[in-house]
Image (tube, coloured by chain):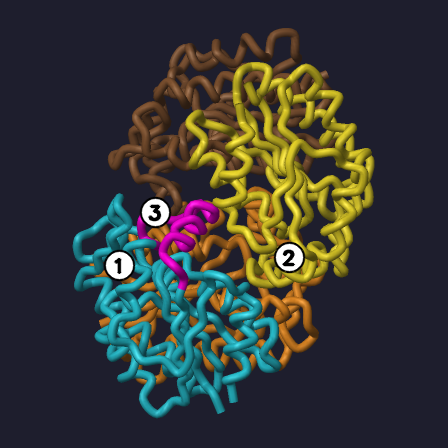
Chain colours: A orange, B brown, C yellow, D cyan
């Protein structure tokens, strides 16, 4: 039985929309947690400190040691929720590619995880970044490929030409 | 010289995304106003009264006399902004079709208006309604066709298979 | 008959809360518009340009010519809404003191306006700025006094020791 | 060393503002999690189902078995984050009074917890509920007293006449 679905993709690749569609079509209730959730829970000073997380004007995201420390504890907590019986969709951006996946593998050890790559052509993601209007311009292009480097998946979806709902249906067919 | 762009389409057809892309690619600054803006400015009681605006559980939107009265004054004000020199993108849902367009034509009289229909196949719009997660389910399907009945346009775009940015570029080519 | 209520005060002085309380207790429906509304309607690039509006790290707000031009048209439009019969609460920050008030007096000419000063001790406003968590730190202190310089009021309220609802009741008693 | 701060109080008693002030003044970074966080992570259908969570028009909040199940797993996860080294501020509404506290005591067992009661006179909380404008009217009054029944605290603060920052300073003095 699938306990955790990990959606990894660059900014504006469509992960959150797929997560909401999955929540709507899967028969059981699933919690959808993401890196945005964690950032909202942190002190606002974490976004203006070298030790925290910085969103540069060109779209680069730089993560410091304080952010990393809270992030590690957050991962342990999310895994504990799954062990306690909550089905969880994790929406993340593997800025470190394979190394980021390994950071999740440790806390998720022993859980039944479905690893999903969410791809989107960088030019299309860049346009959607403008259309949504709430992101630093440039993140979509910078992250589009690097987040998938060395990452292994159970399945991949591509939102370039497929709707969120269609991708969610493909993923749902792999949830056991 | 185009002074006002009116984007008319059903809920979740993609009007707001197109408006933000237009703001990004047009050389001059444009204000983007919508029916959502107006609702936010109203007393919250306006959403729980028969005289205001009601969002039924099936997605139907019912507008009462108090809402209508403020809406009429709002239209006059938006037109006055355009006359005072602000370029304006209006994002609206013509629930009354041609009658809704006529309500705008009076205040916009004498202004150079580009009327744009924003279409989206209702099944696709319904999926996007789920993906965005902040709308009453059912609005997209109920509004997809009715908002275009009897309405004339200078041009139409269809977001079913085209990205917001692509639609914005098509519209921008008609802005003089 | 009062047609417009102008609430002027520094950031985090409590204007928006008072506006919502006024909307709740006044017998007729009132629209509440503010400078935040206008900023949301502008292109997001307006917040990253010298010609637009800049929120410096120390809380200073610098307004450029492009922002000013749209702002002037916005004021004309808001006044036109009032002339068309909508009762309007304007929530503003007179960064230029008396000069800012004069900018409103021109479009509001002939309308029945209630000018209200919203004061709050700067140390208290600074604490509320932290508590709300969505503002650049420092704005509250920088704006607390300067926005009232040379401005005339029909009445003043002080949120330092009075609740929003209490201030709203005081103001409502002056609405005719 | 304090690992967890639990803030319990009725709706609109000022818990979130105090949490943000604590995050700003405490020397180490703290995560602030609340019941609102959990609700956002759930499927939106959870808010329209008898088995989920319902916000009645009079302000009553009714929690069903599906909500409860996810809530229990969420509590385990939050406690695991604290055990993994994240300092956590929990902002909660003990609708069941002492029974709600007992539900937290189990997962938080062995952690160093500071239990804080956040009180606010119900008439004042009701006014703030109107001023914030994003809550069902009536919750503040219905919850003001019941959430404290039978609950023990390490300290209590009262926001009726004290600012969020002042309450945060009082609490911070008890954090070891």
Q: Which residue is mark 3?
A: D136
Point out which mark residue A173 bears. 1
Which chain does the numbered disc 2 sit on?
A: C
> What element does badge 2 sit on?
helix
> Height in image: C93 above or below C159?
above
Distance between the Cα atoms at labels 2 and 3? 26 Å
Residue under label 2, please give it: C125
Q: Secondary structure at mark 3?
A: loop
Q: To which chain does the residue with label 3 belong?
A: D
Chain where mark 1 sits: A
> Mark 1 to mark 2: distance in Å?
53 Å
Image position of A162 with respect to C80: above or below: below
Q: Is A24 contained in the magenta span?
A: no
Q: Position of residue B174 (x, y in %)?
A: 65, 21
Q: Residue at x 36, y 56 (%)?
A: D122
How far from the left and from the top, in percent, is residue B80? 65, 17
Residue extent of the magenta highlight: D120-140
Q: Residue at x 26, y 59 (%)?
A: A173
User: Percent position (x, y) of residue C23?
Assistant: 47, 34
């Amino acid at each position: 039985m699938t306990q955790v679905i990990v959606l990894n993709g660059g900014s504006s690749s469509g992960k959150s929309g797929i997560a909401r569609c999955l929540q709507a079509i899967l028969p059981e209730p699933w919690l959808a947690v993401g890196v945005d959730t964690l950032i909202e829970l942190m002190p606002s000073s974490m976004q203006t400190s070298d030790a925290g997380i910085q969103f540069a004007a060109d779209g680069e995201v730089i993560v410091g040691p304080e952010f990393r420390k809270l992030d590690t504890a957050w991962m342990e907590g999310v895994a504990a929720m799954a062990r306690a019986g909550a089905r969880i969709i994790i929406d993340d951006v593997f800025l470190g590619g394979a190394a980021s996946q390994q950071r999740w593998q440790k806390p998720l050890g022993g859980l039944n995880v479905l690893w999903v790559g969410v791809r989107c052509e960088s030019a299309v993601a860049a346009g959607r970044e403008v259309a949504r209007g709430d992101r630093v311009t440039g993140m979509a292009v910078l992250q589009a490929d690097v987040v998938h480097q060395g990452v292994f998946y159970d399945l991949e979806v591509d939102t370039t030409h497929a709707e969120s709902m269609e991708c969610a249906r493909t993923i749902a067919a792999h949830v056991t």
